Image: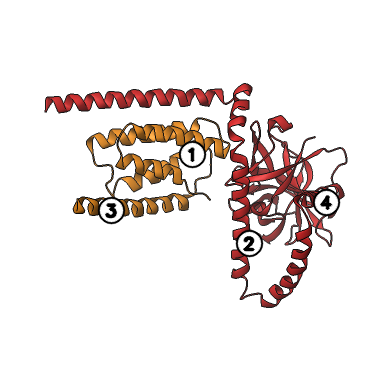
């Protein structure tokens, strides 16, 4: 019995020693991760993982697009029949196109969008998506924390962590996202806004694809279909489209009114985005 | 919303294999997860090691594979992990992990009984 207890205590000591040692090594890695030279080493280690992540994301996007096709089949027969005809034509064209052509299309739209000419952009590919988006550009490409990410002239998110070879993006729908915005009337093609500022408010993420527009004074007029655009305050660049109001909460006795906003771009389906460098 | 299956696997592995090698599994898995996610290197392994060590200590006195203990421990660990990584806590994903742990535990315990029976 005494021998058994002795052996158990010895085993516990060895386990505690090993746990302590591994915890110490993890702490060391944790503190070293903020050093630039260690970041380069991590970038070298993470490089083989990037192509695998990208392919996994592409496979996931393709599989979700197939489930959407079958789930809408009953409800939209005619629309699907028309889309099938268009898809067949597009499939013939797409066979002749390479991934460089897709990049060119994105760059053309970005150049044609109403953004300041002095802004500089860098293209990045989406590698992974959980609560945060991961792109294949990092510190060595000039990416820094706080830079905005757009698709055409629509805001996608902000860089919150720039590693050596990749970066993490906080999306609009993230619960930590709070953006000062203005509300404007849309143009007919919904890619631009017309007129002046209708209202000012604060846009916050609610998780999933939901956005909430809050802190809009009751005296200000906001309606379903109005466009929400960044105000250019608190570190966010101005005049970037964010979303469209889908539902305004009924007026109440509170000081502020609220509205639900739908993002103009589905972050889950993005493959190419642009980083605003300056 | 994502399921932390790595955390669940490590804790179930530790519960069934209460030895020091579980610490190595937790350490290496944490480092690999940080590399894959792009989060701060070493943070996941710190959390996994802490949880694994606690489970090992618990297993010295009590039965870690009990149906009333391990799923709750995995559930609480998933919440703790989300808090430590500054992620939004999705209670639904933690509950799914809780249910998955019960299922995996049930299958493993039945398989263990069958193997012992045939031996």
Residue B16: x %, y % from top left? 30, 42
- Chain A tint as drawn: red
Tag 1 residue: B83
> Can residue B44 be seen in this snapshot?
no
Cα–Cα span, label 3 and label 4 = 58 Å
- Badges 3 and 4, same chain: no
Tag 4 residue: A109
Neighbours of disc 1 within 10 Å: few (<14), some (14-19), many (20+): few
Quarter of the image holding residue A167? top right
Q: Secondary structure at mark 1?
A: helix
Chain letter, disc 1 residue: B
**For the residues bearing labels 3 and 4, Cβ distance under 8 angstroms:** no
Q: Secondary structure at mark 3?
A: helix
Tag 2 residue: A65
Q: How is the image coloured?
A: by chain
Mark number, residue B111: 3
- Badges 4 and 1, same chain: no
Cα–Cα span, label 1 and label 2 = 32 Å
Closer to us: B22 or B82? B22
Residue at left 28%, top 36%? B58
Quarter of the image holding residue A116? top right
Residue at left 61%, top 76%? A74
**In front of the other: label 2 or label 4?**
2
- Badges 1 and 2, same chain: no
Residue at left 47%, top 45%? B4
């Amino acid at each position: 019995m005494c021998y058994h207890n002795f052996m158990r205590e010895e085993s516990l000591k060895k386990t505690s020693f090993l746990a302590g040692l591994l915890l110490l090594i993890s702490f060391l890695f944790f503190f070293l991760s903020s050093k630039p030279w260690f970041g380069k080493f991590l970038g070298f280690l993470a490089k083989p993982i990037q192509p695998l992540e990208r392919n996994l994301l592409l496979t996931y996007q393709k599989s979700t697009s197939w489930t959407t096709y079958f789930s809408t089949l009953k409800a939209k027969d005619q629309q699907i029949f028309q889309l099938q005809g268009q898809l067949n034509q597009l499939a013939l064209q797409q066979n002749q196109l390479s991934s460089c052509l897709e990049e060119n299309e994105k760059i053309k739209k970005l150049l044609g969008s109403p953004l300041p000419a002095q802004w500089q952009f860098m293209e990045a590919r989406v590698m992974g998506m959980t609560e945060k988006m991961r792109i294949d550009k990092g510190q060595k490409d000039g990416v820094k924390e706080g830079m905005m990410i757009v698709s055409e002239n629509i805001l996608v998110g902000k860089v919150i962590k720039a590693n050596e070879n990749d970066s993490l993006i906080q999306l609009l729908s993230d619960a930590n996202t709070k953006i000062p915005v203005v509300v404007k009337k849309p143009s007919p093609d919904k890619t631009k806004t017309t007129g002046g500022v209708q209202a000012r408010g604060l846009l916050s993420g609610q998780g999933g694809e939901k956005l909430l527009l809050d802190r809009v004074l009751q005296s200000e007029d906001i309606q379903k279909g109005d466009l929400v655009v960044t105000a250019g305050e608190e570190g966010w660049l101005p005049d970037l489209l964010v979303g469209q109001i889908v539902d305004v909460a009924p007026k109440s006795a509170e000081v502020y009114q609220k509205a639900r906003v739908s993002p103009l771009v589905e972050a889950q389906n993005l493959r190419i985005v642009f980083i605003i460098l300056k | 919303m994502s399921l932390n299956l790595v955390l669940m696997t490590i804790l179930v592995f530790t519960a069934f294999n209460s030895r020091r090698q579980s610490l190595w599994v937790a350490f290496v898995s944490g480092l690999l997860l940080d590399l894959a996610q792009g989060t701060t290197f070493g943070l996941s392994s710190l959390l996994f090691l802490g949880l694994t060590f606690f489970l090992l200590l618990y297993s010295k006195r009590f039965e870690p594979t009990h149906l009333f203990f391990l799923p709750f421990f995995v559930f609480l660990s998933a919440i703790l992990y989300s808090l430590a990584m500054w992620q939004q806590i999705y209670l639904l994903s933690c509950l799914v992990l809780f249910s998955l742990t019960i299922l995996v535990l049930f299958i493993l315990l039945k398989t263990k009984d069958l193997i012992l029976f045939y031996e």
